[in-house]
């Protein structure tokens, strides 16, 4: 079981392969949305709780709210995309279309 399906499950066992991401921007700048794949596939919307996934993220990503991560100036969308996909995260642009 995964923590978004069972609150007693450990976040330590999740990997990038468990998550979708999408890159987008708003008035505050660029961001990456991240949500569990099976939750999104089953429900059609983001997991709206805190994700305890800092241990599998690039170190420069910072959580700004549930499922939303920002990065400092000096990193491009291409660099962020490559860092996430190399960790197993799967890009899914439907995340930002359905937000």
Image: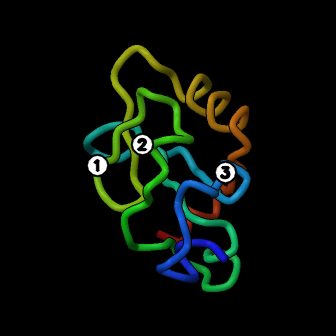
Q: What element carries label 2?
A: strand
User: Residue placed at 58% from the left, 50% from the top?
Assistant: 22
Q: Up-down: is 28 above or below 47?
A: above
User: Residue placed at 34% from the left, 24% from the top?
Assistant: 72
Within 10 angstroms of label 2, few (less than 14), some, or many (20 or more) residues?
many
User: Residue placed at 61% from the left, 25% from the top?
Assistant: 78
Q: Up-down: is 81 above or below 64?
A: above
- Which one is in front, 73 or 10? 10
Label count reads: 3
Residue 85 visible in the shown view:
yes
User: Residue placed at 59% from the left, 23% from the top?
Assistant: 79
- Residue identified by numbered label 3: 15
- Residue identified by numbered label 2: 31
Within 10 angstroms of label 1, few (less than 14), some, or many (20 or more) residues?
few
Q: Where is residue 48 in the image (x, y as percent from the top left)?
A: 40, 73
For marks 1 and 2, give the CA distance.
Answer: 9 Å
Foreground tag (2 vs 3): 3
- Residue identified by numbered label 1: 64
Foreground tag (1 vs 2): 1
Q: Up-down: is 75 above or below 56?
A: above
Q: Is mark 3 on a helix, strand or loop?
A: loop
- Which one is in front, 86 or 82? 86
Residue 71 placement: quadrant: top left
Contact check, label 1 and label 2, Cβ < 8 Å: yes
- Which numbered disc flags the more N-terminal residue, 2 or 3? 3
């Amino acid at each position: 079981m995964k923590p978004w399906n069972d609150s007693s499950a450990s976040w330590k066992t999740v990997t990038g392969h468990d998550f979708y991401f999408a890159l987008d921007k708003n008035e505050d700048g660029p961001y990456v949305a991240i949500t569990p794949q099976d939750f999104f596939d089953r429900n059609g919307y983001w997991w709206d709780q805190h994700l305890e996934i800092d241990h599998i993220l690039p170190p420069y990503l910072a959580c700004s709210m549930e499922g939303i991560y920002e990065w400092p100036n000096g990193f491009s969308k291409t660099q962020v995309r490559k860092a996430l996909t190399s960790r197993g995260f799967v890009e899914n642009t439907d995340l930002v279309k359905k937000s």
